């Protein structure tokens, strides 16, 4: 591996750094965006049970806020349960925007890496081509410099693609996952609002 890095020259280092960042984001988002951690399926029935028993207190709301992303939406709804349905929905929407921002954290960076990595590879290719043509002089050509130019060009082109493809696939996957989670949480939050205001059992 080290021989490949040496053969690819200095242009490979930005790609290596980008790949490390991309892997860190992919691992972090895969852990954070688990459906069971973001929007537990059993949370709404539990809250409904608490409501039926009249057990919603400030401590309960505080626990919900710390429970999960969905818990934050429910806590916002319960904190505004004494107001009209419209006010409760507005409170949920405000909290929902903050939750969506948290769910999308680092995804723009991952998308940027997926877009920029091929360009970094192209930069390395251009630098390799410059070295390659620099090998030809009026007095002949330098075989070692010619070979190095080819190595720099090809390795950087390949590295740019290798970094970009997984990053783009992961970005698209996480974007879809965030959208699905947001839709699911919105539906559950609406159900809770209807339960609070007596429009659903």
Image: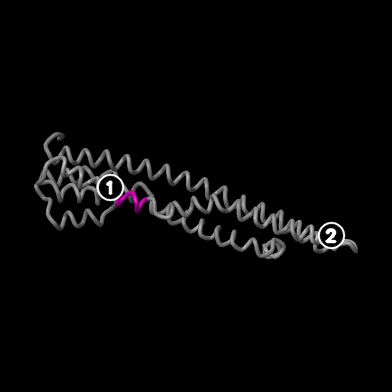
| Residue nearest the viewer, comparing 113 with 33 | 113
Q: Which residue is drawn at 43% across and 45% down?
A: 175
- Membership of 101 in magenta stretch: yes
- Relative vertical location of residue 160 with respect to residue 88 in this rendering, above or below: below
Percent x, y of residue 107: 44, 51
The residue identified by callout 1 is: 96
Using the rendered view, name the quadrant where residue 155 is placed: bottom right
Q: What element carries label 2?
A: strand
Q: Give the range drawn in magenta.
A: 97-103
Count how many numbered circles sit on residues in the image.
2
Residue 192 vs residue 134: left or right? Answer: left
Quadrant in the picture for the C terminus: top left
The residue identified by callout 2 is: 136
- Dot 2 alpha-carbon crowd within 10 angstroms: few under 14, some 14 to 19, many 20 or more: some
Q: Distance between the residues labelled 1 and 2?
A: 62 Å
Quadrant in the picture for the N terminus: bottom right
Percent x, y of residue 54: 9, 47
Residue 91 vs residue 5: left or right? Answer: left
Q: Residue at x 90, y 64 (%)?
A: 139
Dot placed on the residue nearer the N-terminal end, 1 or 2 = 1
């Amino acid at each position: 591996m080290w021989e490949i890095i040496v053969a690819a020259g200095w242009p490979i280092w930005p790609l290596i750094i980008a790949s490390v960042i991309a892997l860190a984001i992919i691992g972090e988002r895969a852990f954070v965006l688990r459906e069971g951690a973001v929007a537990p399926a059993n949370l709404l029935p539990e809250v409904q049970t608490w409501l039926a028993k009249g057990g919603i207190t400030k401590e309960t709301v505080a626990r919900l806020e710390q429970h999960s992303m969905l818990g934050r939406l429910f806590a916002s709804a319960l904190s505004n349960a004494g107001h009209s349905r419209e006010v409760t929905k507005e409170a949920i929407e405000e909290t929902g925007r903050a939750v969506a921002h948290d769910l999308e954290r680092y995804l723009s960076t991952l998308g940027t890496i997926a877009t920029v990595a091929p360009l970094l590879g192209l930069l390395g290719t251009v630098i390799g081509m410059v070295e390659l043509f620099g090998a030809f002089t009026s007095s002949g050509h330098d075989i070692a410099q010619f070979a190095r130019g080819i190595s720099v060009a090809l390795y950087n082109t390949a590295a740019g693609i290798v970094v970009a493809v997984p990053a783009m696939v992961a970005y698209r996957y996480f974007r879809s996952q965030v959208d699905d989670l947001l839709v699911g949480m919105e539906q559950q939050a609406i159900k809770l609002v209807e339960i609070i205001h007596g429009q659903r059992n």
